[in-house]
Amino acid sequence: MDKRKETAQGFSKKGDVFYGKGDFEKAVVNYKRAVALDPANAGNHFGLGLAFYRRGDVGQALGCFKRTIRLVPTFFDAIYYTALCLEMEGKFVEAEKSYLKYLEENPDDVKAVNRLGLTYLKLHDSKNARKYLEKALKENGATQPTYFGLGFLKEIEGDLEGALSFYEKASEIKSDSKGLWYQTGLCYRRLGKFEKALPCVERELSLFPKSVEALYLKGVIQLDLERFDDAVSSFNGVLKVDSGRPEAYVSRGNAYSLLGDFERAVDDYHSAIDADASYVPAYEALGVLFRLNGQFREALDYYHSAYDVKSDERIKKIMDEIRIQMKV
């Protein structure tokens, strides 16, 4: 054996030892030496890629796996890890291609089946996501994200009870993943089960206190529960982080309206329009408020502004009703 290759093999073996011990820094050092001495050896590049991957350096790992495949196009483990890295980098179309290529040779690898299903979910391809995730579930390869993903697909289909069933299974495996309790709370709210929805969203916020989406949903559910002061507090928190969010102004305005604070409600609806002049719900909210107060001319003007933004027959019908009220 060539002396350089023999030395490279020694470094590669040392890399394997450190990798096995979980010392990925030293594994990287030794695999790098192996690659430098024997760059034509695909296994050295693959070993270095794995060490980078375990170290959390996905970009470096991806480069190593691609070099591995250039040397040996049928190095299927490298193809699988290439797909993983591409998925982690958000390059889902490329990840899909790599997973499919890997599965051509390894059709029964349930881990890859599962990952492909999750990739399709991120690509908003519900049909293929369901196909592969259900296959992973059937073949006992489901992970927490599998149940979460299937729950999300059920939710999209409108099967909220089915979605909750999958979210429950997901939480039994891992209960602290981002979005799980948010989606569970959203399902309960859509089912009208507000008392069950609120604790779920509060749990999401306990895990991810900076989640503006969860805080906004909390405020909406508090409105549903007629806890108007609490809702105002939640929307205050949302607007402190995102002052340009029109739906938060409208929702807080609704809370103020229900508290009987007409002036603050009007201010919030106008703030929503200032944030987004095309936000129809703000004009409609003003229309509703002025109509309820018997100020029909003002109400009609706001509905007319809404209609100018979006020519909706429903809005036109309301305008006709107000005109009739004005004549009475």
Image (spheres, grey):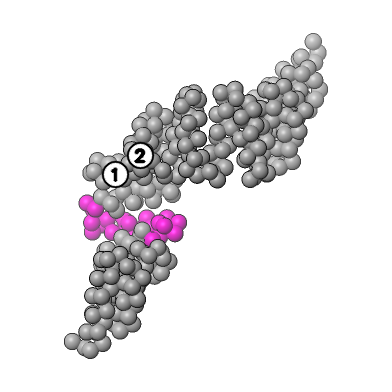
The numbered dot on residue 303 is none
Amino acid type at image mark 1: Ala
Q: Tell me if residue 161 is in the magenta stretch.
A: no
State the residue at coordinates (74%, 41%): 274
Amino acid type at image mark 2: Ala
Residue 210 in the image: state x and y as whole percent.
Answer: 55, 45
- The residue tagged with tag 2: helix, strand or loop? helix
Q: Which residue is mark 1?
A: 142
Q: Distance from label 2 to label 1 (Cα)?
A: 10 Å
State the residue at coordinates (46%, 33%): 200
State the residue at coordinates (42%, 29%): 160
Q: Tell me if residue 89 is in the magenta stretch.
A: yes
Residue 151 in the image: state x and y as whole percent.
Answer: 38, 37
Magenta region: 85-109
Residue 124 in the image: state x and y as whole percent.
Answer: 44, 45
State the residue at coordinates (37%, 65%): 55
- The residue tagged with tag 1: helix, strand or loop? loop
The numbered dot on residue 170 is 2
Most extreme residue toward the left, as rendered? 1
Task: Tell me the crowding category of disc 2: few under 14, some 14 to 19, or many 20 or more residues within 10 angstroms, Cα based.
Answer: many
Whichever of callouts 2 and 1 sits on the residue coming sooner in the sequence is 1
Q: Nearer the viewer, residue 202 or 283?
A: 202
